[in-house]
Amino acid sequence: MSDERRGSGTDEADDPTERAVASTRSETTHPDDRPKSRTYRDRGDVIGVWTAAAQTWGLRLIVVAAALYVLGWVAGRFWMVLFPISLALVLATVLEPAGRFLRRRRVPDALAAALVMLSFIGFIIGVITILAPQVAGQVPAIAEQAGDGLRRIQVWLVEGPLEVTEGQITTAIEAVEDRLQESASAISAGVFTGLSAATNAIINLVLTLMLTFFFIKDGHRFLPWLRTLGGRRAGDRAAELLSRSWRTLGGFIRTQTLVSLIDAVIIGIGLAILGVPLWVPLAVIIFFAGYIPIVGAVVSGFLAVLVTLVTVDVRAAVIAAIIVLAVQQLEGNVLSPWLQGKSMNLHAGVVLMSVTAGGTLFGVTGAFLAVPVAAVVAECLRYMNEQIDAGVDPEAPPEDSHAAQILREQQ
């Protein structure tokens, strides 16, 4: 019995031979050859993370670029519809405060909008009535003075430092005449194009006035309807974004109107003192050109100097150029920063690129609408930045959690 217990109770681990083999196996196995989990990041992991991030952002940029392209294509296709709507919105931002003033006096919405529109149309007709006789009465005298100016220029070219001969001037004039005769068919065809453009302009004018009337009459009902339709989260955010955009657009247009009016008054008074015959129409042109920043001021100022040169003399033209440059410096360094304020201040490079892009894509109207659109887009980006700040963890660095505030302080 003792032998059986001894035989059955004996284990392999108790065998001296097995213990020696196990000890030898543990000594010959290197620690690095034992399987273990990798907890470090090597260069391959870092490169993989960077590559994945580049792929993700690359796809996002491609999607955003495609979306912008599609929006631009749609805007180009439906420009005939979007154009009067855009003009009506811009016009409504200027006239809406008057409509709101009448509504607060318990004037019905339709009557308030009608009174505002009739007053605006009457003002435009009054300006045209004042300007038309002056322009019509002074055109013959200006044409005669322009001829005298051209003759003086011809004499200066011949007797001045350039020493241009009479034959060269005659050859250049004949070349221009031949070019005009060759282009007679194109000019005659352009008459019909001009008639079509005039018809479209009349249609757009009527649509713009009608849409402006409806925006003044029913525009204040849109945001409450949007809040109800979109719910508390989406509706409130959309309404807040549109409300900010509307205030930005209205503030920009009204402030730019004031800046353009100051420029037109100062330059107009200067031209009147110099004795320029068409100083009133030139002041009006300067006023409307002020809505196209940078480019409009340069073009209208050049026109004023050119008319002064033709109708008066070189000395008056130099003085007019000095007045125009001084007023532009006053506008750029004092009026616009002070009146527009930091919340609507756009960098000059952004303004210039916006005007260039708008003018290239949609002509003069695009240049006119470029800066208001840029101001609205900038306000949308500010609102998005605020929403991103609201979603950032409070423990994040200040640059991540308060980016909108930092950007406002840097402006």
Image (cartoon, grey):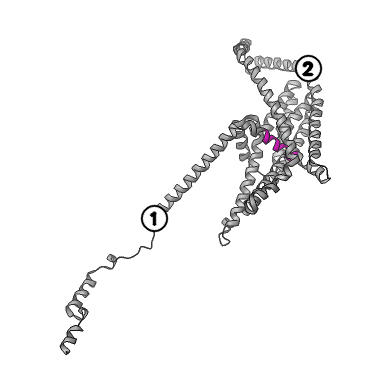
Which disc number belongs to residue 141? 2
Which disc number belongs to residue 60? none
The amino acid sitting under disc 2 is Ala
Element on which disc 2 rests: helix
Magenta span: chief secondary structure: helix
Q: Nearer the viewer, residue 302 or 390?
A: 390
Q: Nearer the viewer, residue 161 or 259?
A: 259
Are the residues tagged 2 and 1 within 8 Å (C-beta)? no
Q: Is residue 324 visible?
A: no
Q: Quadrant of the N terminus?
A: bottom left
C-alpha span from label 2 to label 1: 82 Å
Q: Earlier in the sequence, mark 2 or mark 1?
A: 1
Residue segment shown in magenta: 84-94
Query: x%, y% of residue 16?
Result: 18, 80
Query: x%, y% of residue 276?
Result: 78, 24
Quarter of the image for residue 280 reads top right
Label 2 CA crowd tier, 10 Å (few <14, some 14–19, many 20+): few
Q: Which residue is mark 1?
A: 45
Q: Residue at x 65, y 38 (%)?
A: 371
Query: x%, y% of residue 209?
Result: 73, 33
